[in-house]
Image (spheres, rainbow, N blue to C red):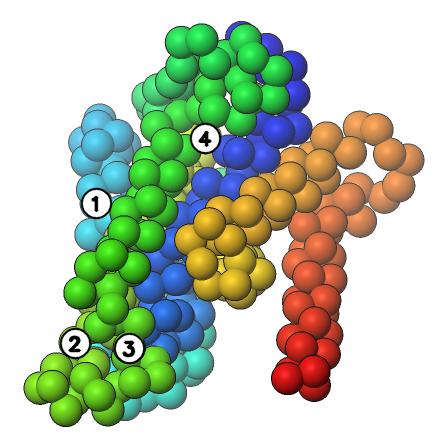
């Protein structure tokens, strides 16, 4: 069924991997650890998902394998950062470079190519149509006609809010950043909660990465295309709040969707149009930085 607002419908699909990665990254950020390995976690999940789904013939196996692979890499980053006291930025960059390299190497070994891999006969995730919502303007494009990934990302974000703000686990996890000594005085090890936050980020990124490939039936080297980095921007633009993260992810989804539709409309170079989401990211970062400085001066 054709959507009456195709840009909005496309934006919801585009924002989903960003929202999943940002949801996972929100846990590490609130726990006091800036997880810049989100890009590598997404890419690891994307490659593992389509390879395992191809060999097993099951999308479910692909998604579960993607979650396991991303959580394994996240656990490695957590151990090196928290246990071995490595610099979190260097460790995160190393994880991103490792994911970019290992996926190409494995692609060459398994499929004899370092380029695009197309899985023509692979089953695609099913589309869910919500009764009564599909024909409603705007609402239908926003809420109906998406794959289960979209609804799973919303449910996961809701549980994120419950865990972070309505459970002792969330209270202790948020205390790791500014009140770690208080946790230590209670006999609680902050590093254990920070490690759990890394695992949660790997879980969410595994699902988000699997969407990138299973939704298309194609793997492209570096298919994550900076989405892990943009997810970090989404976290800060959303003021490190679940609802704010959702709104920020939707804004970036709209920017990306507009760039896709503008290619056949605007008489400007295609390279510039494709760069719109990244230009938007840079502008947002500058804007947030200026706003933060002015706010601090007032205070």
Q: For this rendering, which residue is in front, 291 or 248?
A: 291
Q: Would residue 270 be visible to someone looking at this image?
A: yes
Dots 2, 1 in contact, CB < 8 A: no
Mark 2–mark 1 distance (CA, rounded to whole Å): 24 Å
- Image quadrant occupied by the C terminus: bottom right
Mark 3–mark 1 distance (CA, rounded to whole Å): 32 Å
Residue marked by disc 2:
192
Residue placed at 54% from the left, 8% from the top?
135
- Counting from the top left corner in percent of width and height, residue 292 is at 65, 75
User: In the figure, 81 relative to 232: above or below?
Assistant: below
Mark toward the start of the polypeptide (4 vs 1)? 1
Q: Nearer the viewer, mark 2 or mark 1?
A: 2
Q: For this rendering, which residue is in front, 86 or 53?
A: 86
Residue placed at 52% from the left, 63% from the top?
239
Tell me: 243 left or right of 47. Answer: right
Tell me: 138 left or right of 105. Answer: right
Residue placed at 85% from the left, 44% from the top?
269
Looking at the image, the residue that sits furthest to the left is 187
Residue marked by disc 1:
65
Query: The residue tagged with tag 3: helix, strand or loop?
Result: helix
Residue placed at 28% from the left, 47% from the top?
159
State the mark number for residue 216: 4
Mark 2–mark 4 distance (CA, rounded to whole Å): 37 Å
Indicate the quadrant where residue 29 lies: bottom left
Dots 3, 2 in contact, CB < 8 A: no
Q: For this rendering, which residue is in front, 103 or 110?
A: 103
Query: The residue tagged with tag 4: helix, strand or loop?
Result: loop
Residue marked by disc 3:
175
Mark 3–mark 2 distance (CA, rounded to whole Å): 12 Å
């Amino acid at each position: 069924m054709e959507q009456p607002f195709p840009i909005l419908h496309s934006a919801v699909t585009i924002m989903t991997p960003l929202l999943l990665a940002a949801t996972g990254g929100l846990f590490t950020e609130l726990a006091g650890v800036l997880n810049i390995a989100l890009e590598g976690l997404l890419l690891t999940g994307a490659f593992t998902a389509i390879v395992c789904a191809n060999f097993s013939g099951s999308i479910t196996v692909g998604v579960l394998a993607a979650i396991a692979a991303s959580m394994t890499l996240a656990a490695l980053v957590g151990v090196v950062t928290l246990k071995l006291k490595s610099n979190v930025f260097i460790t995160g960059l190393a994880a991103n470079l490792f994911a970019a390299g290992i996926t190409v190497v494995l692609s060459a070994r398994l499929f004899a190519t370092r380029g695009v891999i197309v899985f023509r006969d692979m089953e695609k995730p099913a589309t869910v149509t919500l009764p009564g919502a599909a024909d409603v303007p705007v609402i239908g494009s926003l809420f109906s006609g998406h794959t289960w990934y979209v609804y799973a990302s919303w449910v996961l974000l809701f549980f994120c809010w419950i865990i972070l703000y309505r459970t002792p686990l969330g209270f202790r996890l948020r205390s790791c950043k500014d009140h770690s000594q208080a946790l230590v005085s209670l006999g609680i090890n902050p590093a254990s909660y920070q490690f759990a936050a890394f695992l949660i980020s790997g879980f969410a990124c595994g699902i988000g990465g699997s969407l990138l490939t299973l939704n298309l039936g194609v793997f492209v080297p570096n298919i994550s295309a900076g989405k892990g980095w943009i997810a970090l921007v989404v976290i800060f633009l959303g003021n490190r709040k679940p609802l704010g993260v959702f709104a920020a992810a939707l804004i970036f989804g709209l920017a990306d969707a507009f760039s896709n539709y503008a290619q056949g409309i605007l008489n400007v170079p295609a390279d510039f149009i494709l760069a719109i989401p990244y230009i938007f990211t840079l502008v947002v970062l500058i804007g947030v930085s200026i706003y933060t400085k002015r706010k601090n001066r007032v205070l």
